Amino acid sequence: MLKEKVRTLLEKGLEEDPSLFLIDFTISSDNKIKVIIDGDRGVTVNDCIKISRAIEHNLDREEGDFALEVASAGATAPMVMPRQYIKNIGRKLEVETSNSSYEGKLTQANEDFIILEWKAREPKPIGKGKVTVQKREEIPFSDIKKAKVILKF
């Protein structure tokens, strides 16, 4: 009952700002509601407040007490949806697949795959020494086990 009501209110709140989207939504056995959102242009504190109010102001505490937390996915959280990759085109990612790991610049993303590009030093085909080569890997979403943005400070 509570979960369906919260989901409906959450969807209405997200409809008001199409740049925001849901990452995760849970309700614990003691009615702690946790909502994780992301946005095509990031998430501000005001975005979290808007979603929180859309839910909280339409629930009756007389029916049952609850705690509500609305938060952004966070810069270091692993990405879980194609839409998150699309918003991070141009940034450096660390991507793990079942048989490999990659670190490179995200140059393309759609609903099916991502493309990472990076430079690597490899032995020269002939002679001694190394040469810098441009690498490119197309990775289907179905192969990605974990991916996150690498932050520079």
Image: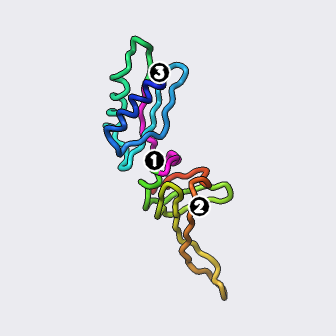
Kindly identify the residue that appears in the image at 44 percent across and 29 percent down.
7
30 left or right of 46 in image: right
Label 2 secondary element: strand
**Which residue does the numbered mark 1 point to in the structure image?**
75
Main secondary structure along the magenta-highlighted residues: loop
Residue 102 marker: 2
Tell whether position 72 is magenta: yes
152 left or right of 147 in image: left
Please provide the residue range marked out in magenta.
68-82
Spatial separation of the CA atoms under disc 3 and disc 2:
42 Å
Question: Looking at the image, how many numbered discs can be counted on the residues?
Answer: 3
Q: Quadrant of residue 11?
A: top left
**Which residue does the numbered mark 3 point to in the structure image?**
2
Against 51, residue 105 (above or below) is below
Can residue 66 be seen in this snapshot? yes
Mark closer to the chain start, 2 or 1: 1
- Give residue 19's position: percent from left, percent from top: 35, 46
Spatial separation of the CA atoms under disc 2 and disc 1:
19 Å
Against 135, residue 151 (above or below) is above
Spatial separation of the CA atoms under disc 3 and disc 1:
30 Å
The residue at the far bottom in this view is 127
- Give residue 118's position: percent from left, percent from top: 53, 68
